[in-house]
Amino acid sequence: MGAFSRRYNPMTDLPDLHGKVIIVTGASSGVGKYTALHLARKGAKIYLACRNERKTLAVIKELQKEGLGPGNGTLHYIHLNLSDLESVKKSAEEFLARESRLDVLINNAGYSEEAYVTTRYGLGEDIVANFLGPFLFTKILLPLLKSTAKETGSDVRILNVSSEAHRFASGSIAVYTSREALSNKVSDSRIGKSKRYGYTKLANILHINELQRRLSEEGVPITCISLHPGAIATPAVQNWVSYMLPFGKAIARLVFMAQEDGAITSAFAAGGTEIKLDVERYKGVYLVPFGKIGKKSKEANDPQKAVDLWNTAEKILKELNV
């Protein structure tokens, strides 16, 4: 959309997506749920990668009633628990056993904690669920994404759903050089929790930056994009606002945009024709509603931080043998 002033409409503006295979993580609610709906309505085969099978299957039935039918795409469930790295590996391998192509990977799932929780990996659950889990999931699926990208007419994309909250992680907080740095609790105050969440969202952008750099250096035609979906009244956002303000959940529901609208930028990033027509312009960009190229924070533009994050993640995964 970039140069367009009007609002992007997935129903009319997305191209036909028949033959495309797409994974949307965290698609049992919020932005992920409606991203799956927008893309499936255009014919794509969508895998909803989520932790809760019962909830996700119920959502699939709900979405099918909302507009899927003959000629539309299909919705499928695959188990994915991003807080459990062994589970992440198993889920990715299960997908590889089921499919011979992957056109778009949307790392959408987001975790907003109410209290700091340390996982058995010695890392906070927020950094595992929001960054390290998606990093591992992407790493295992990357060979299939690369092979799909070699096909004639392919248009392979990897998306990380981040947030404007990435700006909360600045200065001495925005360090990714070690396991200890990734485990920085900051504090359990409202501001501390917001900075900790922003730290993981900054990691999402840095991950995309370094992944795009590496793929471009290899000459692999895959477009990597990070994005801010907007201020949306998802359950996670309602929880986050409640950290900052009294009656935050109620305020979020009144002020923020609907969840279906919040999926518009993700849908554009996943299938928008404009990106394919001007791919060099969109490589490694940060999109904001509705499909516009936004401005990253100073930290999010730091190539050394992106390298530090990548190297630290690889080191941790090697130490954990996953």
Image (cartoon, helix red, strand yellow):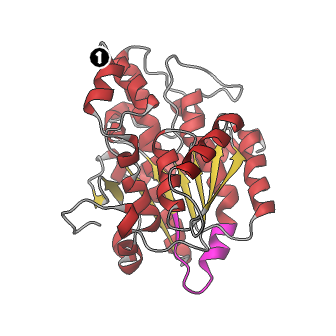
Q: Amino acid at mark 1?
A: Leu
Which residue appears at 52% of the width and 46% of the height? Answer: 33
Badge 1: few (under 14), some or many (20 or more) residues near its Cα, within 10 Å? few
Q: Quadrant of the N terminus?
A: bottom left
Q: Is residue 314 left or right of residue 42?
A: right
| Location of residue 190 in the rendering, given as x and y in whole percent from the top left corner | 36, 17
Q: How many marks?
A: 1
Which residue appears at 78% of the width and 62% of the height? Answer: 98
Residue 157 visible in this rendered orientation of the protein? yes
Hey, which residue is sitting farthest bottom in the picture? 152
| Location of residue 233 in the rendering, given as x and y in whole percent from the top left corner | 37, 33
| Location of residue 23 in the rendering, given as x and y in whole percent from the top left corner | 61, 56
Question: In the image, is residue 243 above or below residue 220?
Answer: above
Q: Give yes or no for residue 225 being in the magenta stretch.
A: no
Residue on which the image places disc 1: 245
Hey, which residue is sitting farthest left in the picture? 5
Choose top left, top right, bottom left or bottom right for residue 252.
top left
Q: Nearer the viewer, residue 156 or 217?
A: 156
Question: In the image, is residue 110 above or below residue 149?
Answer: above
Q: Give yes or no for residue 155 being in the magenta stretch.
A: yes
| Location of residue 35 in the rendering, given as x and y in whole percent from the top left corner | 48, 52
Residue 319 visible in this rendered orientation of the protein? no
Q: Nearer the viewer, residue 217 or 105?
A: 105
Which residue appears at 78% of the width and 47% of the height? Answer: 90
Region in magenta: 144-157
Q: Quadrant of the C terminus?
A: top right
Secondary structure of the residue carrying tag 1 is loop
Which residue appears at 51% of the width and 23% of the height? Answer: 113
Choose top left, top right, bottom left or bottom right for residue 226.
bottom left
